[in-house]
């Protein structure tokens, strides 16, 4: 074969695809890890639970046991009670004179301003992003910031759609405050969070015009999900019934100190559907009894109690945690040896997150050599980790 023939050689169009789905990548499970505790294992733990592994952090955790290191990252030991970080401030004053917030002062809780050619929100959105990244870079020795990122991908919104600066700040702080708390409680709070109500049209969900956006995402993305074939566990009628149970929640769109609700969501009983809501056989044909007046808000809890009674919720969330912290694919062995028992722990602890994370991060499976160095970092993780590990200093400047 001469060079021309070699360079023009075509790949056969009927190449075989090998199926490895029946093979187990590793058979390790949730038994406590009893191997070595060296720089390698410390770096593996820190790179998964924080953004990068600085030399100081590695040395700090190297002097602990595996159990104490995980407990420290989960804020069980060696941590004060959580207090929220200082909010973002007006660092855009040289580009925009904000009549509602002086330079250097916190802007959350003050109204956005629209002028002829400038909208304050666009500058505050950039301020919010830079503030959030600074929380990651300056994180304490804790998994909280990594879990805030996890939840922002799970209970996702788009800043470009929300367009109210205080809403996006309160959304972010809600995730951070509940990052190591109870998943069911967080699901309730995110359901009536102003940013989520705006993003998924919950504020437009009324008895006379039910909006199904959030009722669908609550089941499809946030809780029960779909089976292995992509078929939803719930029905279209379940989506409609959930939407009706959630009618009446709306946003304060005025904001500021002159508004009764001050950038918060609230329940308006005049917009609520007070009739009964019947669900499918998947939910055991449950009927949520319609309630009127202020009691209509209680239907949210009835809805969540029904949804969280399904085993699929714990399984779906444990799979997401696994893909985020361990590996991006779940084979049959990982499902049986890791996901199923983790989901049982999740349910047994009423959806408290710490027992699940503690068991996972202390397990032989997490430290399995086949689970080390195998995660492709998303851009934000790579960039923040690089900045922390190389000690890059960022000068305070206008955005």
Image: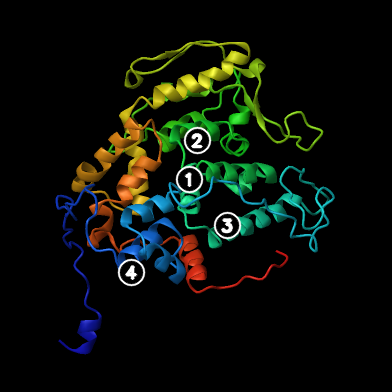
Residue 385, above or below 31 = below
Q: CA distance from mark 1 to mark 4?
A: 29 Å
Residue underneath mark 1: 151
Where does residue 3 sit, x and y in percent of width and height?
A: 22, 88
Q: Nearer the viewer, mark 1 or mark 4?
A: 4
Q: Is residue 399 left or right of residue 315?
A: right
Quarter occupied by the N terminus: bottom left
Kind of element beneath mark 4: helix
Q: Nearer the viewer, mark 4 or mark 2?
A: 4
Query: Mark 4 and mark 3 in contact (Cβ < 8 Å)?
Result: no
Which of pointers 1 and 4 lies earlier in the amino acid sequence? 4
Cβ atoms under marks 2 and 3 closer than 8 Å: no
Query: Tag 3, which secondary structure?
Result: helix
Q: Position of residue 136 (x, y in %)?
A: 54, 58
Q: Are circles 1 and 2 on residues that touch, CB within 8 Å?
A: yes
For discs 3 and 4, the disc positioned in front in the rendered view: 4
Secondary structure at numbered mark 2? helix
Residue that label 4 marks: 39
Lower position in the chain sequence, tag 4 or tag 2: 4
Say whether disc 3 or disc 4 marks the residue closer to the N-terminus.
4
Neighbor class of circle 2 (other Cα within 10 Å; few <14, some 14-19, many 20+) is some
Q: Earlier in the sequence, mark 2 or mark 3?
A: 3
Q: Residue at x 36, y 14 (%)?
A: 285
Q: Residue at x 31, y 48 (%)?
A: 360
Disc 3: which residue: 135
**Residue position for label 2:** 186
- The image quarter in which residue 42 lies: bottom left
Specify which label sits upstream in the sequence, 1 or 2. Answer: 1
For the residues bearing labels 1 and 3, Cβ distance under 8 angstroms: no
CA distance for labels 2 and 3 = 21 Å
């Amino acid at each position: 074969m001469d060079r021309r023939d070699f360079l023009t050689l075509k790949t056969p169009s009927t190449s075989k695809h090998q199926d490895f789905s029946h093979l187990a990548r590793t058979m390790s499970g949730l038994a406590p890890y009893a191997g070595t505790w060296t720089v390698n294992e410390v770096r593996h733990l820190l790179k998964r639970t924080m953004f990068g592994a600085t030399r100081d952090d590695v040395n700090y955790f190297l002097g602990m046991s595996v159990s104490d290191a995980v407990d420290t990252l989960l804020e069980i030991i060696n941590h004060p009670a959580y207090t929220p970080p200082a909010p973002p401030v007006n660092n855009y004053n040289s580009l925009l004179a904000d009549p509602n917030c002086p330079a250097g002062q916190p802007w959350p809780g003050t109204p956005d301003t629209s002028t002829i050619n400038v909208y304050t929100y666009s500058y505050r959105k950039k301020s919010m992003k830079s503030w959030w990244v600074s929380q990651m870079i300056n994180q304490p020795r804790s998994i909280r910031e990594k879990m805030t990122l996890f939840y922002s991908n799970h209970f996702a919104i788009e800043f470009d759609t929300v367009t109210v600066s205080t809403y996006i700040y309160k959304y972010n702080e809600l995730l951070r405050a509940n990052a190591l708390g109870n998943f069911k409680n967080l699901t309730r709070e995110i359901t009536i969070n102003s940013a989520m109500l705006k993003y998924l049209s919950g504020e437009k969900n009324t008895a006379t015009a039910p909006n199904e956006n959030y009722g669908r995402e609550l089941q499809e993305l946030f809780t029960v999900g779909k089976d292995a074939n992509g078929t939803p566990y719930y029905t279209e009628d379940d989506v409609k019934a959930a939407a009706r149970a959630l009618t009446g929640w709306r946003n304060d769109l005025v904001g500021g100190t002159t508004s009764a609700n001050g950038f918060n969501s609230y329940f308006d009983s005049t917009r609520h559907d007070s009739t009964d809501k019947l669900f499918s056989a998947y939910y055991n044909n449950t009927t949520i009894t319609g309630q009127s007046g202020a009691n209509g808000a209680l239907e949210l809890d009835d809805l969540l109690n029904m949804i969280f009674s399904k085993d699929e919720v714990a399984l779906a969330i444990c799979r997401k945690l696994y893909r985020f912290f361990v590996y991006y694919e779940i084979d049959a062995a990982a499902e049986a040896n890791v996901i199923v028992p983790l989901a049982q722990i999740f349910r047994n602890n009423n959806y408290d997150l710490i027992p699940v994370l503690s068991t996972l991060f202390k397990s032989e499976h997490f430290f399995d050599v086949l689970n080390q160095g195998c995660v492709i970092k998303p851009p934000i993780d790579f960039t923040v980790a690089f900045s922390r590990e190389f000690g890059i200093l960022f000068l305070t400047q206008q955005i």
